[in-house]
Image (cartoon, rainbow, N blue to C red):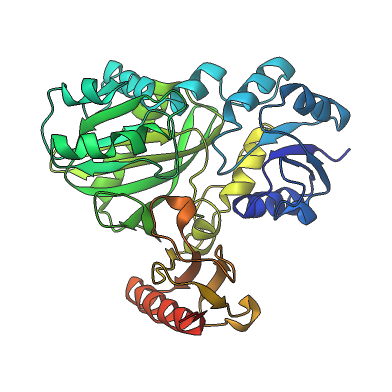
Amino acid sequence: MTKSILVFGAGLNQLHLIQAVNELGYRSVVIDPSPNAYAKEFAAVFEVVEPKDYIRTREIAQKYNIDGIVTAQMENPLILMAKLANEMGYIFPTQIAVECSRNKFQMKKKFIEHGVPCANGYLTNSIDDALGKEISFPAIIKPADAFSSRGVFKVDNRSQIAELYDESAMWSSDNSVILEEFMEGTEYNIEMIIWKGNVSIVQCTSKLITPYPRTVELAQIQPAILTEEQLEEIQRLMEKTVKSLGLDNCGGCCEIMYTNEGPKVIEMAARLGGDFVSSYLPEYSCGVNMDKALVEVSIGNDPLVTPTKDHNCLVKYLELPVGKEVKCLPRISDITYEGLILTYFYIKEGDRVSDITHSATRSGFIIVQADSYEEMMRRMQLYENEIISMIEFKD
């Protein structure tokens, strides 16, 4: 009998996962709160379910005889999924481990308890409390449990803490904020599959971000340029990090800062990385389909995580002129270049281009592949400029 996989989320960022379920020969049962979800047409079965409706989710799992549960880049369903797994016997991290990975301060305490190198920091609940903390500048202020770079700022003095505190706190579920030391170095994302106690690093990702004080990703690049010694050091750190949180049988995305003292952990998510760093980028850079690997883990099969390619791939978010109103967008089907894997516009005709304040305010992206780093970067700059020139703005 064909196995059925319950997929949480049917947005654009889940399309690659749903396709992976289908290509593996399993039945994709997909749930999403939107009846018009982007990837619904690719699902074998699609059901509309509110994000926190545990009863309805459990009913669907029973109705379709679900064998495994997965989500790739979605943060919000993780705790509900862990609860469902505990009740119905699915392969998934424990609820305690997931809750710890969702709360950045609880995560930090686990890191410190287990000797995982990370930034020192405080949990605060008010501007006055934050201003009273002893901390060196520059520093980072961020919500305790948000995602997608929402409310994350670099601050250089107490005046900036006061100025940015409310904007950071608004993204936290309980208005709590973390104030932590700023780590100097180069930041990377580490994309991994965790299964049966094994930590398999698939790719290391470098990034370009917005100018400070914001820290929103403008580009994600694979593979990151690292030495063998650095990669071995990162592998040891990831094993220690995963163990500290008690994670197993899931995707993982860890942000690290490579400092003069070695790599230090910023945050660790109990899911695959967003911004397509776990879907299109590894498939086109090293030949590993992380979504397929995750699906196999969900039903107890060993995943395929051995690289078969050695290319370069990146996602670049389009930087459009802020404040301009879009008059006309080019058809995606008309945008064809060598090595251009995917183009997408979040912005629509009639929209006004907003400043990039967090991930959801970006206007669109391109995914580009090449045989060398230099050619990939050349294509990125050329293709972005040419695509932007195709967009008509109102005077």
Q: Quadrant of the N terminus?
A: top right
| Residue 253 visible to the viewer | yes
Q: Residue 378 is drawn in which quadrant?
A: bottom left
Residue 188 higher or lower than 50, as above or below: below
In the rendering, at what x and y percent does residue 344 appear? 57, 67
Q: Residue at x 69, y 24 (%)?
A: 90
Q: Residue furthest front?
A: 395
Between residue 60 and residue 264, name the one nearer to us.
60
307 vs 231, left or right, is right
In the rendering, at what x and y percent does residue 201 appear? 43, 43
Between residue 230 and residue 114, name the one nearer to us.
114
| Residue 222 visible to the viewer | no
Q: Residue 132 is drawn in which quadrant?
A: top left
Between residue 81 and residue 369, name the one nearer to us.
81
Between residue 275 and residue 261, name the one nearer to us.
275
In the rendering, at what x and y percent does residue 234 appear? 30, 40
70 vs 6, left or right, is left
Q: Residue 81 is drawn in which quadrant?
A: top right
Q: Quadrant of the C terminus?
A: bottom left
Residue 291 higher or lower than 384, as above or below: above
Residue 151 higher or lower than 379, as above or below: above
374 vs 173, left or right, is left
Marks counted in the figure total 0
In the rendering, at what x and y percent does residue 227 appear? 25, 53
Q: Residue at x 70, y 50 (%)?
A: 18
Q: Residue at x 39, y 44 (%)?
A: 149
